[in-house]
Amino acid sequence: MITLHDKIRGCIAGSWVGSAMGAAVEGWTHERIVEAYGWLDRLLPYKHYTAYTDWQRPAGTTEDGIERQKLMNTTAIAKGGRFTAEDLVAVWVRDLQPERMVYKQEPFDQTLLEMARSGVPARELGRLWPFNNVNSLARAGHTIGIVNAGDPDGAAADVYDVGLVYASAQTYALRWAALYHASIAAALRPDSTVASVCDTALAYADYHAQHDTPYARYDSVKREVERALEIGTRHVGDPMGMLPEFDALYYGGTHFVYAMSQANEVVCKGLAIFVASEGDARTALLAAVNYGRDTDCVAAVTAGLAGAYSGASALDAAWIEQINAATAIDPYTNSYRDIDTTADGLHAVVLKGIEARRAYVDLMTGNQAWLER
């Protein structure tokens, strides 16, 4: 039996291992990965931000997306439950050090911190963000799905609170994040299936859709989700077989910032690989890492969802051990909680939420006569 704890640990481990393994080949084409490694299935050392740093990251070191997730994990564990934009930004202001951020976080992370410290309200930060379809929250906000385990509605609603630190409410970035984190919440149910997780993604593709507005003419979210799920279904058992179709849909773009990190591309690939891999976290993670383009983001999304569905036991224990070892010696990380202590903390948060709901139901239904008209 896959337990709730194993599913939570699987979501964290999948996203961390996927990020760390994919980071070594981020921005590469699939063909370049094949030429260099044949089939990449191991954690490698790598460098990022070489224009202004010279840090060789040991194999198993995670990257900027997981640093964002770690801040959310810290916030949820400290609060003991669901958290708000203000809660998250308070942790930023308390914990982040700009001189260390240059090694592991994007320039926009530093800018958001500067604006928060200058007094910009948490829910107004996203209005000042220029990247309206970047996958920053979709690929880093797994915590939102976890603390709302079994409750997709709660996860989608929290995206439109917490997510306002990264984007305004009108952006497609939040639409994609909402449907993805709702899917994680659905995957964490004891009765989840690959089909039920996909049904959730499709159901939330219209969440906060602005019908009958000028935005509606450009709204392709549901169509893209439907297409991704259809492609994945045609390639069940062969996730690499659909790579040519995705390369024909999402390509180029190196002339603009975060071209390969658009939320629609990353989330659609993640959903399709999840389906084609039949929810198996190991299969899904390795396919995503070897796809090319934004490999760390696609792998974090794909393996985070598959891990929430199939649990950490579906992943190689050696990968998890190596990630934990790299975390322990990381001089620039936001948190030294490893995969196991993070999963333990978030599991306790979810259990606390379940007990609170049980107490509410007991209170409201304890006297049958009181419920009657």
Image: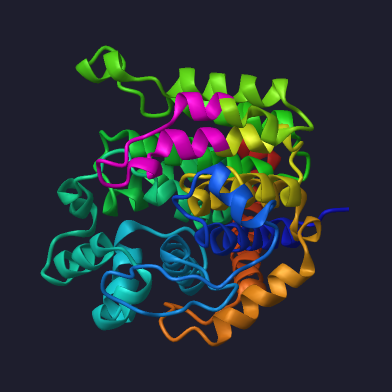
Picture residue at 66% right of the left edge, 50% below the top: 285
Q: What's the image's color scheme? A: rainbow
From the viewer's perspective, is 371 left or right of 179? Answer: right
Image: 66 above or below 189: below
Q: Position of residue 5 (x, y in %)?
A: 73, 62
The verdict on residue 254 being magenta is yes
Residue 209, by quadrant, is top left
Q: Position of residue 51 (x, y in %)?
A: 27, 69
Instruction: Check if residue 160 falls in the magenta segment.
Output: no
Q: Nearer the viewer, residue 178 or 317?
A: 317
> x, y (%) of residue 114?
16, 69
Residue at far left of view: 118
Magenta span covers which residues? 245-269
Rendered residue at 50%/38% (across/down): 267
Of residue 72 and residue 371, the one placed in the foreground of this image is 72
- The quadrant in which residue 21 appears is bottom right
Q: Position of residue 27 (x, y in %)?
A: 44, 50
| Residue 271 appearing in the image | yes
Majority SS type along the magenta span: helix
Please identify the quadrant where the C terminus is shown.
Answer: top right
Q: Is residue 222 above or below residue 57?
A: above
Q: Is residue 36 above or below residue 348?
A: above
